[in-house]
Amino acid sequence: MNYFFILISRGRLCLYQLSLSPPPLKIFN
């Protein structure tokens, strides 16, 4: 369950960064 929670929080952080910075290069690099 902890691993699942970490996965969800990670996905949320990725989505949050995507909404903050439109260019994906900032996130992947």
Image (cartoon, rainbow, N blue to C red):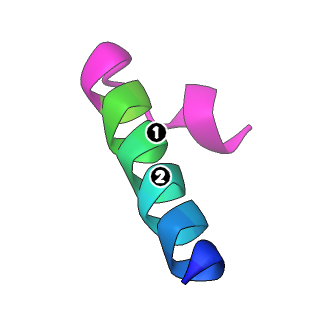
Which of the 4 image quadrants contains residue 18?
A: top left
- Horizontally, residue 10 falls left or right of residue 23, namely right
Q: Residue at x 42, y 63 (%)?
A: 8
**Does the magenta-highlighted stretch encompass residue 3?**
no
Give how far across and how far down residue 13 sits, in percent. Answer: 46, 39
Count of all numbered marks drawn on residues in the image: 2
- Horizontally, residue 5 falls left or right of residue 23, namely right
Boundaries of the magenta span? 19-29
**Does the magenta-highlighted stretch encompass residue 25?**
yes
Give how far across and how far down residue 1 sits, in percent. Answer: 54, 84
- Horizontally, residue 21 falls left or right of residue 24, namely left
Q: Nearer the viewer, residue 7 or 21?
A: 7
Q: Are the residues flagged by discs 1 and 2 in contact, CB closer than 8 Å?
A: yes
Give how far across and how far down residue 12 sits, in percent. Answer: 37, 47
Report the residue that reaches farthest toward the front. Answer: 1
Residue at which label 2 appears: 9
Q: Residue at x 34, y 30 (%)?
A: 16
Q: Quadrant of the C terminus?
A: top right
Residue at which label 1 appears: 13
